[in-house]
Amino acid sequence: MCGIVGYVGSHVDGAALDVVMEGLARLEYRGYDSAGVALVADGTLATEKRAGKLENLRQAIIDHPLPPSSTAIGHTRWATHGGPTDTNAHPHRGGADGKLALIHNGIIENFHPLKERLVADGVKFLSETDTEVAAQLVAREYEADRDLTQAMLRAVAHLEGAFTLLAVHADSPGVVVGARRNSPLVVGLGDGENFLGSDVAAFIGHTRHAVELGQDQIVTITPDGYDVIGFDGEPTEARAYEVTWDASAAEKGGFDTFMEKEILEQPHAVADTLLGRVDPAGRLVLDEVRIPEERLRAVTRITIVACGTASYAGMVAKYAIEHWARIPVEVSLAHEFRYCDPIVDENTLVISISQSGETMDTLMAVKHARELGAQTLSICNTHGSTIPRESDAVLYTHAGPEVAVASTKAFLAQITAAYVLGLYLAQLKGGSHAEQATTILAELRGMPDKVQTVLDRMGRVKEIARFMADTRSVLFLGRHVGYPIALEGALKLKEIAYIHAEGFAAGELKHGPIALIEPGQPVFIVVPGPDTPHDLHKKVVSNIQEIRARGARTLVIAEDGDEEVVPYADEVIRVPHSSPLLQPLLTVVPLQVFALHLATAKGLDVDQPRNLAKSVTVE
Ligand code: AGP
């Protein structure tokens, strides 16, 4: 999704361009298909933009050097309106003299009527984007009083939709103005220089002092400071905070890919997400939950809204919360939530799960839930992002920055946070629920070591992945909490290895999908531990026999000591024993490693798979 960087410093040299290019490189993980920059220099505006990777922009700047400057904006674009071409790339110029440059993340929903009016007034458009409309509007407003902040304020009054906008003007050196509605923007504070970014990664190489902006706010940065006003024009306070991670945390740290690094960071992601959640008496403490305990005790139903991998974490959460806290839980894909006329009232807790905190589908579901009167709680990995700010309560995961498009460590952290929440709700219920919560919590604290054990055993999984580089289809089966893990295993393979993959509830096989099984078809099966209630283990072993009898190649993920699977397995991948509900933290790891190494064997770009963005900020 689009990445945005803004910079003003006190010296007119090459620094502004360097800072902005560095910021764009750090934001590459968001996914993009073109990039561009604009600089203010000596009363003129210089821009360069190119379709494709940042390298294309770098080469263009080498071929046509830009002048020294103290004021710059930069953008990586993920196309929505208009294809990924040089012309549609941002920045877009505004005004008859083309002296204003503007970049944008989001979608301006009413751009058609606005454009028609501007065209009728004689404005010429070069691109097919909605963004150019905003550039022309801000430029037109600038003519009234030549004040860029006031021009932005008047322009945003015309806009509907979601947007972060940054603008510079050739006649206003040393000033960058930003505006945000339903789209991310943070301020970075330096010494004699200030920054704007889609997230702190944009400026983390320069400062850890950041300022969170609220919805519908406009910020103006100069080398000496920043000012924030609301869309009503009134000055407003913004919260300053310190970023707790440094630039090296967002770099590969010697690994070939971010995804590999992030898979190996999973024991820490789980451990850090548990940190500070337990008081000396062993009871759970959730400082960030701002919903009063009595309100939480009154919760009669829970709806989880999320997308993709986060929704699979939500499915795991459903099994755990229902079992521990005995509260009915429904999981809804966030983009479907509004349209199914959800039954939600003030005794409903709507839990959103999102790594980025910016997924537009999830944000809109949260807003809808609030409109319906629900309590909203966000499980999120990104401080200062939009979804937690729009929610009544937040439970942050502490996975650190996740850069690879394919989510791995955030998934484990989301499941961990969901467990913590489930145990907390059980604790609030008291009685036997609370006692059980104490036992499970003790086991949960031992899970990071078990995740590490799984990682230490991945040699054979990597070999299998390499042998299977030519495979055209892989199936994944699981039951109970193994079912969402089967779905996640399939999603990982689809998104980074471009292989057709499907996840099924193993019990569903006989109702149709077993017809897909033909000799040699590889099938991963996530096997529950032998002590899982309701003879589930035996039932899954029967499912393995059924597909093996039809020629499937069975790749079985089973607990240490589970010998019953051996006669029916072509490969057995072992994970340590755990309580049934905690098993997903272990069984998903081999599936992540498998996808990573198969995609690598195919020579694919693991961190930035085609057509995908890390942060999906459009609906
Ligand atoms: C995961 O590998 C995917 N890239 C994707 O499904 C992702 O989990 C989904 O888009 C939700 O993102 P979020 O957690 O940032 O809201």
Image (cartoon, rainbow, N blue to C red):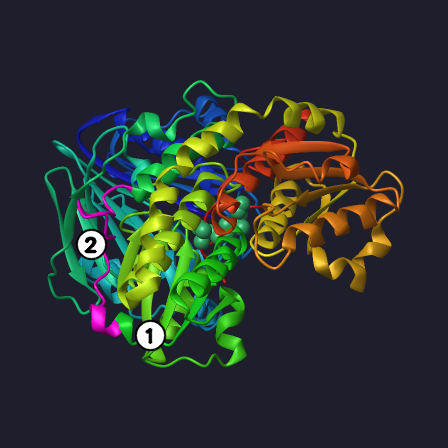
Q: In the drawing, does residue 213 fall left or right of residue 25?
A: left
Q: In the drawing, does residue 415 fall left or right of residue 142?
A: right
Magenta region includes residue 12? no
- Of helix, strand and loop, which one carries label 2? loop
Q: Is residue 286 visible?
A: yes
- Of helix, strand and loop, which one carries label 1? loop
In this rendering, the answer to whether 197 lies above or below 602 is: below
Residue 333 picture location, percent across and down = 53, 64
Magenta region includes residue 279? yes
Q: In the drawing, does residue 535 fall left or right of residue 223?
A: right
Residue at (12, 31) in percent of width and height: 191
| Residue situated in front as seen by the camera: 462 or 18 | 462
Q: Which residues are magenta?
A: 275-295
Q: Mark 2 is on which residue type? A: Asp
Mark 1 or mark 2, which is nearer the start of the sequence?
2
Residue 499 picture location, percent across and down = 72, 41
Residue indicated by mark 2? 287
In this rendering, the answer to whether 376 lies above or below 53 is: below
